[in-house]
Image: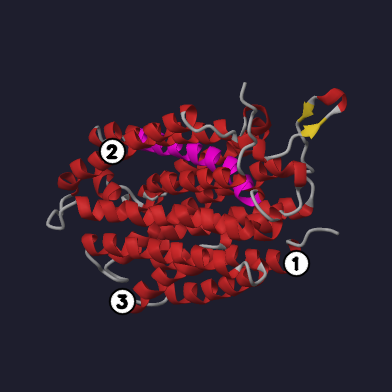
Amino acid sequence: MRPSRSPNPHVLLGTVYFIYFFCGLTQCFEGVILPELKDIFRSTYLEQMLIPFAKNLPFVLAVGIGFLIPRIGYKACLSIALVLYAAGTLLLIPALHTRLYGLVLAAFFVIGTGFSFQIVAGNPLLSGLGPPQGSSSRLNLGNALGAVAQIVAPAMLAFVIPATLVRVEDKLPYITGLFAVLGLVLAGTAAFTLWVRPVDIQAAVPAVPAAGGATRVPTVRWTQPRVLLGFLTIFLILGAEAVIFSNYRNYLLDPEIAGLSSDHSLKLNTVFMAVFAAGRLTASWIQRRIAPATTLIINLLAALALLGVIVMARGTTAVVAVTAIGFFVSIFFPTLYALAIEGMGDQTAQASGLLTMGFLGCAVLPLLQGWLADRVGLQLSLTVCAVPYLAALGYTLTGSRPKR
């Protein structure tokens, strides 16, 4: 009989990095195809923002997933995430062909549920698989891999769709064909995690022994101010990120702002995602040498300055500003998460569930911004991002320090 081997932390970490990259391929389509969906369904800005609302509403389940993890394990949760990603991506195909907007929203809801499982299970592992001082760096690297995948996916879409096609009806077969390929590959990856991978991810997180040798599920101190304020800050900051992502191409296409063509805006969307990924990769390196809170403050101030340009400028200046802001906002979520979860110990999984519920901000703030855009215009509606940036600045300066 072979002796059992303890899971290799490096193998576990590499597995999580792989999943973050691959699931990132399906994450970007929400924002990338919104202009095409607007043409298909003749939707207003508010109706467009129902898509990020549907995709991020499942994060209300995040706390429940956090309590589920000690029972079924991190490996099972990541496998569930991949199954849900595949199902949602494949559901988009009949939804677009039948022109049923409700089915489109249902598909993004399923994708969002998979995203919830991925983040709640994956982020604690990125934080815990290595020295504590490298937690923020690993989180930025893992999330940067997802951002790199989001460069690849729109680039694939720009490559697959001929530049000569203008009508959305002509583009639709190429879009759904790409969804079919991606959905099948996601399903194959889910099968791999279920049946092939020989490591148990749950073993990387210590269980808490109870009396009699049983394992008890830790309870989290929900009233801990650092965690609660971290949740509220992440709620706002992710909502602002969703506003920028969902409206990037809308901003470039608006004739009163930049007036670019659909093909040009799609190519620039790839550049935007490259800038976003570069921000996270840069932060992953810098935060090994400079305190994460310091880099976060610098990036927040830069984002506020660029936001002022975004809501006022026209033409090339506007395009440069809305693209450059991706570099600075890229580190907000992983760094805030690392600051809020530091030192939680056996409460990490449950605290992660609460903090991950902050993705509900991606459902709420875009709706507010879409409502404003229909009334005051797209450009002025983006001022809603200023409040989250100021709130994050206040949290970083005063509320993110662990109590000694």
Q: Which residue is mark 2?
A: 181
Determine the secondary structure under disc 3: helix
Q: Which residues are magenta?
A: 101-127
Point out residue 70 in the picture as x, y percentages from the top left corner.
Answer: 68, 32
Point out residue 347 in the picture as x, y percentages from the top left corner.
Answer: 75, 42
Label placed on residue 315: 3
Determine the secondary structure under disc 2: helix
The tag earlier along the polypeptide, 2 or 3, is 2
Label placed on residue 398: 1
- Tag 3: Cα neighbours inside 10 Å, few (<14), some, or many (≥20)? some
The quadrant holding residue 258 is bottom left
Point out residue 200 in the picture as x, y percentages from the top left corner.
Answer: 59, 33
Q: Main secondary structure of the magenta part?
A: helix
Left or right relative to 123: residue 377: left
The quadrant holding residue 317 is bottom left
Q: Amino acid at mark 3?
A: Gly
- Residue extending furthest toward the front: 1
Q: Amino acid at mark 1?
A: Thr
